[in-house]
Structure formats: C-alpha cells, structure tokens
Amino acid sequence: QVQLVESGGGLVQPGDSLRLSCVTSELTFRTYAMGWFRQVPGKERESVVRISWGGGVENYADSVKGRFTISRDRAKNTVYLQMNNLKPEDTAVYYCARGPLYGSGSVGIDDYDSWGQGTQVTVSS
C-alpha cells in the first residue's frame, strides 16, 4: 500500500495562506512523479500542480500560477503545497497523488494511480 498522508487544510479568509503537506515513503518520494489535485463536489478532480520524479519539471494549473508553489523536502520525504492569496474558488478537497515511476511532471491525471485521503481547504469570509 502506498503511503500518502496529507495535512494542513483548514478554513481561511480570502487573501490568506496555507501550506499543505504530503508525507510519503522514501521510495515514492525519490522515484515517482507526484502531484497535488483538488476536487469540488459535483465536479471532476483537477490538477493543481504536478512535479517530475526528480523535481525538475513542474506543471501548474493556470488558475494557481503565481500563487501556489510546490516544494520537496528530501530529508522528510514530504511534498508541500504553499498556497498564497487564497480565493473562494480555491475551496476544495486537496489530494496528494503518486504518478508514474520516473514520470515527468507533464503526465496527465489518468497516470496517477495512488491517492491520499484528502484534506479540506475552505476559503470564505
């Protein structure tokens, strides 16, 4: 079973920041593409940002460019999603997921085969 444990969600006001964390295994962290995705009830899950297995290629959704940043901590086998200037439309359940072995950050959502339990982010005044 693939370990992907998200945390860091919560209720914030527009303009606030949050940092999500995704702890995984060393094997996943070092050899698999990974990504953050989000889903709103009644809508399809969408990509927020995807990163290649080595961290060299990042692919952000247009809606979050300039506001969200993905980063990795090798010592902690953790992938972060720093979310700044949050907007109400960012409200969703955010998921961390594992992509292909030695995958690029450009692979699509269909290539992600393991998902965390999700963490709720609510942006509301």
Image (cartoon, helix red, strand yellow):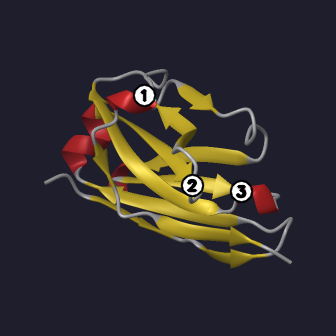
CB under 8 Å between callouts 2 and 1? Answer: no
Where does label 3 land, which residue?
A: 90
Regarding mark 1 in the picture, which secondary structure is present there? loop
- Residue 26 appears left or right of 40: left
Which is more foreground, mark 2 or mark 1? 2
In the picture, the disc for residue 52 is 1
- Residue 47 appears left or right of 83: left
**What's the amino acid at mark 2?**
Gly
Q: CA distance from mark 2 to mark 1?
A: 29 Å
Instruction: Give the residue displayed 76% in from the left and 56% down from the top.
Output: 89
Query: For this rendering, which residue is in front, 103 or 94?
Result: 94
Where does label 2 land, which residue?
A: 42
Task: Assess disc 2: are there few (<14), some (14-19) or many (≥20) residues with their C-alpha within 10 Å of its C-alpha.
Answer: few
Instruction: Give the residue displayed 19% in from the left and 52% down from the top.
Output: 2
Query: For this rendering, which residue is in front, 83 or 42?
Result: 42
Q: Position of residue 117 (x, y in %)?
A: 36, 64
Q: Earlier in the sequence, mark 2 or mark 1?
A: 2
Q: Is residue 53 visible?
A: no
